[in-house]
Image: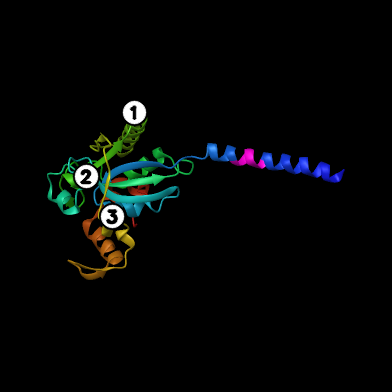
Amino acid sequence: MLNNFVKPAALAILILITITLQHGRSHAAEPDRLVVAGGCFWCVESDFEKVTGVIEAVSGFTGGSVDNPSYKQVTSGNTGHYEAVEITFDPARVSRETLLHMFLRSVDPTDAGGQFCDRGDSYRTAIFVSDAGEKAIARAALADAQMALGQKIVTPVLELGRFWPAEEYHQDYYKGSRLVFTRFGPKRQSSAYKAYRNACGRDQRVRELWGPDAPFVGG
């Protein structure tokens, strides 16, 4: 008699657990992505990989007409590509709106000629979107930033085409241990990155523009 009771009860519990797990999976947020250009992609990648809810940030290129471009091609000009970063994030933990709010306060969105010491078209800022919903969110973020800054923002919202990852040595450059030769002398990648970021004046300019609203100053 007891066995006859236990079996249906166990089956009912198993069904309940299965339904609960399926419900959880059906409501779990799928990873989303945001592609932005903010000057040196090493810096943008470094900044956003620190953000809670960001799964991965990849340095690369987008916006141009050349397939699978090299870093040398893009920085030499004539490809139309921006240095950009593809940010994969969990929308259940951090929203696109929050990421865009942070992005615009981590760059100089008033500069149409590049970013900080890096000049030229490939170093300009931009937000890339895939549909009307993303475009509306991006435009709202730009309007909010312009109101907060009190200056004209020139960062465009552009249609996202194919994103091309940069060469492997650019990925996670900010924390690499490989020895590289720089104008500062031979340094580990992580030290070279810090020296470059400081010499380029990125944090100094962002601090000047955004003050305490700058989310990554000192990163």
Picture quadrant of residue 140: top left
Report the side of 90 relative to 177 (left or right): right
- Residue topped by disc 3: 42
Report the side of 101 relative to 155 (left or right): right
Amino acid at pointer 1: Ala
- Of the numbered discs 3 and 1, the one sitting upstream in the chain is 3
- Residue topped by disc 2: 82
Which secondary structure, mark 2? strand
Task: Determine crowd level at label 3: few under 14, some 14-19, many 20+ residues with C-alpha closer than 10 A.
Answer: many
Give me the C-alpha separation between circle 2 and circle 3: 13 Å
Amino acid at pointer 2: Tyr
Q: Position of residue 106 (x, y in %)?
A: 31, 47
Taking the image as drawn, is residue 216 in sight? no
Q: Look at the image and give the residue range highlighted in magenta.
A: 17-21
Amino acid at pointer 3: Trp
Report the side of 179 relative to 100 (left or right): left
Q: Position of residue 21 (x, y in %)?
A: 60, 42
Q: Is residue 141 magenta?
A: no
Please state, as top left, top right, bottom left or bottom right, where the C terminus lies in the image. bottom left
- Of the numbered discs 2 and 1, the one sitting upstream in the chain is 2
